[in-house]
Amino acid sequence: MESGRMPACDIVPLVGDHIAGGNECLLQGENINNVLGTQVLKVGNRCGHDKNNLKRPNFNKKAKRRPHVLEEAKRRIDQAITNIYAFPEFTQIFYHPLKEEKGRRRRSESVEGSLCLALPTIIHSLDIHRMSCGFYDNQNKFHYYNFAYIENVTDQNYARVKREMKLLQDYGIIKVQTIREQNNDGSWRTTEVRIDLTDKIFQMLELMPEFLKDRETIAKRFHEKQSRLEKNRKKREIYRKPSITPVKAPNPNKINATLQPQLQNLTKRLSALTKRPQAVDKGRGIEIRDKLNLLVSKGYSVAEAVELLRKSQAPPN
């Protein structure tokens, strides 16, 4: 008696056909039923992720040598990924915290992105004196790395990098400072502009003595370099030669056009100051001279003639 269920049926492909599934497992031939019963199909992620061969970032070997504690931290992280019992405190990152102190293993994609790619990149690009990811330019100005740098170095998309940074922030390994910027259309976006590394990762990897020693040495070198640059800057300011800039000859036509009214006013004022006495004044002087000559010819002395002329011209009382 039929139960109403659809009976199981075997799908037998034609000769030359194939079935693709997972990581492209090809099944061909006439006895396909026997193959399906004996062969285990390969399965995996479509992105090509292999949990047995996790990716590692490729750093430039010709770049400036990093401090010893950073190179040792990257080596111990790689050792902890292959053997999670090497550093017990670091092992907690590999498990999801659940209720009743139980946990389940994280997916290998999360381990690969956060511990194999993102965290070594942050440690490699770290300025151990400032504990921030970035570099100094030729003008001795510090530039911070953001999530875009991690995205380019690790060859991942932005969403995945953001999840990895969130995981590292939850465990207190890094700190991220963000700012809000306004787009041209008026909307707002959040930009990660600074990634700071805490000393917790060195505690997990049992590298605190080496970390403190190297940081003290680098801080001393940093302050020596800053003082040397400041002295050189002061010397350059003291012995700096004055810069001589060529002066362009002025346009004479332009000068004449601007100074002509002023010259005319000045000429009028000078002519008024140096004006000669009028003809009336000149004739009166001649009349006084003739009167003095007449008095002298009558027998008066010059002094008596002047006194008589003065009395005659004096106003009456």
Image (cartoon, rainbow, N blue to C red):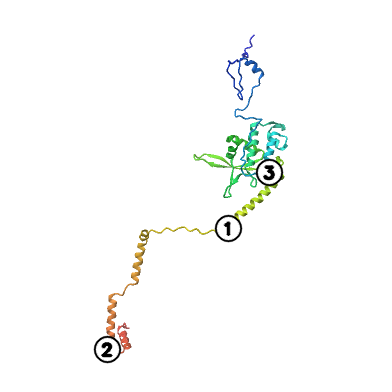
The residue at which mark 3 appears reads as: 69
* Quarter of the figure with the N terminus: top right
- Residue pictured at 67% horizontal, 41% vertical: 71
Mark 2 or mark 3: name the one nearer the start of the chain: 3
Identify the secondary structure beneath mark 2: helix
Residue 136, how many percent across, how many down?
A: 59, 47
What label sits on residue 46 in the rendered view? none
Image-based side of 254 in relation to 8, left or right: left
Amino acid under disc 1: Lys
The residue at which mark 2 appears reads as: 297
Image-based side of 284 in relation to 155, left or right: left
Count neighbours of disc 3 (C-alpha within 10 A) and say few if under 14, some if 14 to 19, many if 20 or more: many
Image-based side of 170 in relation to 236, left or right: right
Image-based side of 215 in relation to 186, left or right: right
Count neighbours of disc 2 (C-alpha within 10 A) and say few if under 14, some if 14 to 19, many if 20 or more: few
Q: Which of the 4 image quarters holds residue 163? A: top right
Amino acid under disc 3: Val
- Indicate which label's residue lies in the foreground, 2 or 1: 1
- Residue pictured at 27% horizontal, 84% vertical: 291
Identify whether 144 is placed above or below 303: above
Q: Which of the 4 image quarters holds residue 284? A: bottom left
User: Marks 2 and 3, Cα distance to the nearest angstrom?
Assistant: 128 Å
The residue at which mark 1 appears reads as: 235
Identify the secondary structure beneath mark 1: helix
Identify the secondary structure beneath mark 3: helix
Mark 2 or mark 1: name the one nearer the start of the chain: 1
Residue situated furthest top in the rendering = 1
Count neighbours of disc 1 (C-alpha within 10 A) and say few if under 14, some if 14 to 19, many if 20 or more: few
Amino acid under disc 2: Ser
